[in-house]
Amino acid sequence: MALNKKTVDDFSAAGKRVLVRCDFNVPLKNGEITDDTRIVAALPTIKKLIADGGKVILCSHLGKVKEGPNEKESLAPVAKRLSEKLGKEVKFVSDYHVTGEEATKAVAAMQPGDVVLLQNTRFRMEEETKPQKAGEAFAKELADLADDYVCDAFGSAHRAHASVAVVTKYISAKGGVNAVGYLMQKEIDFLGNAVENPVRPFVAILGGAKVADKLNVIDNLLEKADTLIIGGGMAFTFLKAKGYEVGNSLVDLEKIDYCKEMMAKAEKLGKKLLLPIDTTIAKAFPDPIDGPIEVSVVDADKIPADMEGLDIGTKTQTLFADAVKAAKTVVWNGPMGVFENPTLAKGTIAVAKALAETDATTIIGGGDSAAACNQLGFADKMSHISTGGGASLEFLEGKELPGVYAADDK
Ligand code: ATP
């Protein structure tokens, strides 16, 4: 899918109030930001709007806000860090109501090029549009602060929340522009091209814990990719479906028929579906997860009944790496084993290394595989690491993301 949505390059923000939905959901420890990747990722769009001479009003959620508004989930640390990164003041509206008198006053006082950050959007329960009507009212309050709207929050784009999607309706109603930011544009270009218009051979690699979490991803990628590789915990349900003994490995009994269906589908479509041919086993899941563990490697059809498969084996590492070498496009989501443990991270490292060494376009679909790439030092070797785990998965499922859909067409 080529991006056919208006972007920040399609309009000038000069003299206009532009509401920008960012993804500032950064990890915090004792009030300090431990990883500012998401803030850095938002800078190009913000800088463009400042350069236009726009009045830039930023908003975002942070955390889950389960217990209601609280200082621990305030966006104050983000305002501070953003201010340092931009080299200019970011005026923070600390009001837990997000919109309202304080926000209105701050916006009214803005000069072209000024930046204001509103409080955590999830401090208003209506953000998650439950009940629907309340979400609409909050979306309108947000839209009332601005003339135009830009969504650059890819990590939230799969949620039809007030500040992500509903707000666009009220911006349109007053003749404003709804566009996507540079970060969204980049994500959609990489993920969209990979899935809809890949340079072939296209190899998709899926791992992680459960088959049930990725049913539609498997289905869609089987159709789109030339080779689908399955590793991680989810491979054992496939192996069980082949009639193998998998011992105490992670198996989703309810999904065995689904796996059989997928294997038949691969055959019918003439696609390669690669499963582990050997596995690294141990007596039990490591406890603590990164503690010492005694392992051995057996063929995938020789797992003893009292053992558990926790990583792909050495032969499988080579099998998967060879498939990556032959590819021109690779998409990867989900670790190959319990990568949190150094002894069980070898399969994930082997796959990350194969991706790092190929000239193919390599795309990492967020979440644990992105964390693994960062942790292993391979991040700068990948063509694209998605900033949104859930959003990129829905993209790989072939779904239209509400945050993208809501933007104006070109
Ligand atoms: P996210 O949804 O955050 O993007 P992900 O899709 O990359 O994550 P998950 O489905 O959350 O991956 O699964 C990751 C978890 O799967 C890791 O914590 C890892 O330890 C676990 N895992 C991988 N292989 C196995 C295995 N063989 N047995 C048990 N757990 C496993």
Image (cartoon, rainbow, N blue to C red):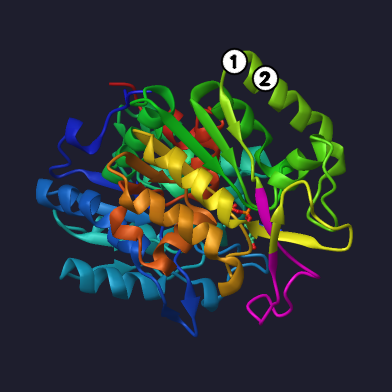
Question: Does mark 2's beta carbon lie closer than 8 Å to ligand 1?
Answer: no
Residue drawn at x 34%, y 33% as measured from the top left: 328
Q: Is residue 352 left or right of residue 337?
A: left
The quadrant of the picture showing ligand 1 is: bottom right
Q: Position of residue 380 (x, y in %)?
A: 29, 58
Task: Indicate the quadrant where residue 407 lies.
Answer: top left
Q: Is residue 327 left or right of residue 339?
A: left
- Crowding at label 2, few (<14), some or many (≥20) Cα neighbours within 10 Å? some
From the image, tell me which residue sits under label 2. Answer: 265
The vertical placement of 302 against 105, above or below, is: above
- Crowding at label 1, few (<14), some or many (≥20) Cα neighbours within 10 Å? few
Q: Position of residue 101 (x, y in %)?
A: 41, 61
Q: Which residues are magenta?
A: 278-296
Q: Position of residue 113 (x, y in %)?
A: 14, 56
Residue 269 got which mark?
Answer: 1
Residue 28 is covered by the magenta coloring: no
